[in-house]
Image (cartoon, rainbow, N blue to C red):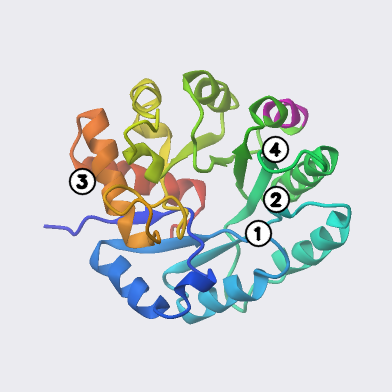
Amino acid sequence: MTKMRLIDTHTHQYHPKFDSDRPQSIERCLEAGVDTLILPNIDVESIPRVLSMMEKWPQICHGMMGLHPCHVDEKFEAELDTIKKQLDNPPAGMRFVAVGEIGMDLYWDKTHIEQQKLAFMKQCAWAKERSLPIVIHVRDAWDEIFETIDKVNDENLSGVFHCFTGGEKEASRALEYGGFLLGIGGVSTYKNGGLDKVLTSVGLEYLVLETDSPYLAPVPFRGKRNESSYILQIADRVAHILNLTTEEVASVTTENAVNLFNLKG
């Protein structure tokens, strides 16, 4: 019997919270059938950490390059210049598989809303020029992100709405763009997470799985440090909601991730 294969499409495994046991955490991933980790960059400071994991575990770790909206301020242009240079200069023999994580976040601060829009549009342009998907972070900013995507969307734009926590309306709007999937994580396991109706209305063909570790650990680990091996609990939950087997969920979401991030070969 072929071992079930899972992909964590969004994990901050380079986070300092893993500094004491990163190799062991990677081993736990492999034991759980998680053989691919996709690492989102968030700012200039995180670049060396992403690169380090790509170089140490080249068969497992794939990086993105992007500027997270919570790190967008009046100096964002200089940050973008540095990140763009890195995007075009991956470690030898390697490549970045996406532009991310990018997007809009108005939960903590609305001061730089216009800068967030500009940074997002610039990074969308990078992705289209390089035929890469984008990985979108959106929090308390659905109207704003859709309004901004409307300005840049075309057949060359694709990606994933990471850590999707919207409702059926937001899911429908996101998928209407044509090139996007929804990233489903630990929130799907929460009693009041609200994703049950969304998942049944969307269907498996539009989903990829993610942990967003070390954040948002699934039940029964909620409140603890999340890690990529817990993608198995998320797959189990999605399978339960959709009345499928975990193997079916793993197979389809893995294929979705392979196609979106061009992981073949």
Classify the position of the C terminus by image quarter: bottom left
Which percent across, then down, holds residue 115? 84, 44
In the image, residue 262 above or below residue 192: below
Mark sitting on residue 106: 4
Q: Nearer the viewer, residue 132 or 78?
A: 78
Q: Nearer the viewer, mark 4 or mark 1?
A: 4
Mark sitting on residue 42: 1
From where the camera sits, is residue 60 visible? yes
Q: Nearer the viewer, residue 172 or 211?
A: 211
Q: Residue at x 58, y 70 (%)?
A: 50
Q: Earlier in the sequence, mark 1 or mark 2?
A: 1
Q: Nearer the viewer, mark 2 or mark 3?
A: 2
Q: Mark 4: which amino acid?
A: Leu
The local secondary structure at tag 3 comes to helix
Q: Earlier in the sequence, mark 1 or mark 3?
A: 1
Whether residues under marks 2 and 4 lie with C-beta atoms below 8 angstroms apart, the answer is no
Whether residues under marks 1 and 2 lie with C-beta atoms below 8 angstroms apart, the answer is yes
How far apart marks 1 and 3 lie (CA) works out to 32 Å
Residue bearing mark 3: 247
Q: Residues within 10 Å of mark 2 (few under 14, many from 20)?
A: some
Residue bearing mark 2: 70
Q: Earlier in the sequence, mark 4 or mark 1?
A: 1
Q: Mark 3: which amino acid?
A: Glu
Name the chief secondary structure element in magenta: helix
Q: Mark 2: which amino acid?
A: Cys
Q: Earlier in the sequence, mark 2 or mark 3?
A: 2
Magenta span of residues: 146-151
Q: Nearer the viewer, mark 4 or mark 3?
A: 4
Q: Earlier in the sequence, mark 2 or mark 4?
A: 2
Which percent across, then down, holds residue 148? 75, 31
